[in-house]
Image (tube, rainbow, N blue to C red):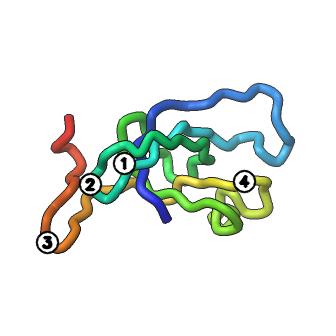
Amino acid sequence: MNLAKVMGTVVASQKEESLVGLRFLVLGIVDGNGKATGATVVAADAVGAGVGEMVLFASGSSARQTQATDKRPCDCVVMAIVDSWEIEGDEKYRKGDDE
């Protein structure tokens, strides 16, 4: 699993039939301190995440193990919206503090 911030959405009117109904998000990958790494990825959204939220995502074969992506050609999926995280007792992020 990896941490990322939802940067935006992707609309694809023409797509593989099994992908119809999935929402796609542009994610900016962050490090443990919440700083952007500069890398981005597009992921299927399994949890209803919104732009600006911090999320956990999985890639590779793990991305096909959610109810929303089961047996679909997905390589990346958002599977959790992050409320907070800490490292060695130091809180690095709390939802709502960055607004």
Q: Tell me, for residue 89, which label it has, or none.
A: 3
Q: Residue at x 76, y 40 (%)?
A: 20
At numbered mark 2, what does the secondary structure look like: helix, strand or loop? loop
- Residue 26, percent across and down? 54, 37
- Residue 57, percent across and down? 51, 57
Judge depth for marks 3 and 4 and give the one in front: 3
User: To which residue does mark 2 refer?
Assistant: 33
Q: Identify the amino acid type marked 3.
A: Gly
- Residue 34, percent across and down? 30, 50
Q: Identify the amino acid type marked 2.
A: Asn
Disc nearer the start of the sequence (3/4): 4
User: To which residue does mark 4 refer?
Assistant: 74
At numbered mark 1, what does the secondary structure look like: helix, strand or loop? strand
The answer to whether the residues at label 1 and label 2 have Cβ atoms under 8 Å apart is no
State how far apart marks 1 and 4 are (Cα). 20 Å
**Residue furthest to the bottom:** 88
Disc nearer the start of the sequence (2/4): 2
- Which quadrant does the C terminus fall into? top left
Q: Residue at x 66, y 27 (%)?
A: 11
Q: Nearest the camera: 31 or 66? A: 31
At numbered mark 4, what does the secondary structure look like: helix, strand or loop? loop
State how far apart marks 2 and 3 are (Cα). 13 Å
Q: Residues within 10 Å of mark 2 (few under 14, many from 20)?
A: few
Q: Identify the amino acid type marked 4.
A: Cys
Q: Tell me, for residue 54, which label it has, or none.
A: 1
Judge depth for marks 2 and 4 and give the one in front: 2
State how far apart marks 1 and 2 are (Cα). 12 Å
State how far apart marks 1 and 3 are (Cα). 19 Å
The answer to whether the residues at label 2 and label 3 have Cβ atoms under 8 Å apart is no
